[in-house]
Amino acid sequence: MATDNPHPNGPGPGSTGVTGETSPHLSLQTVYLKDCSYEAPNGPRVDGEWNPQFSMDLNTQSSTVAPDVREVVLTVTVDAKQGDKTAFLVEVKQAGLFLVRNLGDADQKRAIGSVCPNVLFPYARAVVSQLVTQGGFPQFVLPAVNFDALYNETMAEAQRQTVKN
C-alpha cells in the first residue's frame, strides 16, 4: 500500500524528525531580499580624491508568520557623502524565515535580536556591495558588525530605562 509522503527521503525542511521534541531549535528556512533602494543623486562623478564619509544604520524587526516561524528583517542603510553632496544612499531589507521552537522568552529575544541578524548580514552586505559597484562607484564592503554586542547594549539601555521609570 502506497502512502503520500511529501518528503520520501526523510523529514521535511527544518524538521528534527522527532515528534513532540522539546529541545531548543532555531534554523533558517529561507532567506530573501525583501526590498532595496539605491540612489546616486550626483552620479559616480568624483571631483578630486574619492574620500567619502560613510554612515551606516542597522535595524532589525520580526513578526510571526506561522506557528514556530518568525520572519526577521534586517535593514541596512548606508549613506556616503563626498563633501556636502550625497554620493550614494543604499537601503537593503534582507529577510529570512526562521523556525523557532522551544526557546524560552530570553533565548528567543536573543536569537531574533542577535543570531538571526548575524545570519542575514552577509547577504545584505553582498547586495549593498553589488548595488554600489554597479552604480559606478569603487568597491565598497560593509565592515563586520558585532550583533551580540549591539543586542547587549540594547538590553542594557532598556534595563536603565526601566530603572529610571
Image (spheres, rainbow, N blue to C red):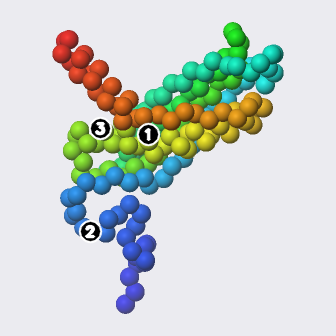
**Displayed quadrant of residue 113:** top left
Marks 2 and 1 close (CB-CB < 8 Å)? no
Graded by Cα atoms within 10 Å as few (under 14), some (14 to 19) or many (20 or more), the crowding at tag 2 reads few
**Given the image, on which type of amino acid does mark 3 rest?**
Lys
**How many labels sit on residues?**
3
Residue ID at (25%, 16%): 161
Residue most toward the bottom? 1
Q: Earlier in the sequence, mark 3 or mark 2?
A: 2
Residue 146 as seen in the image, left or right of residue 25: right
Gap between marks 3 and 2, in whole Å? 25 Å
Mark 2, residue position: 18
Residue 56 as seen in the image, left or right of residue 109: right
Residue 76 visible in the shown view: yes
Gap between marks 1 and 3, in whole Å? 12 Å
Q: Earlier in the sequence, mark 2 or mark 1?
A: 2
Circle 1 SS class: helix
47 or 18: nearer the viewer:
47
Mark 3, residue position: 109
Q: Earlier in the sequence, mark 1 or mark 3?
A: 3
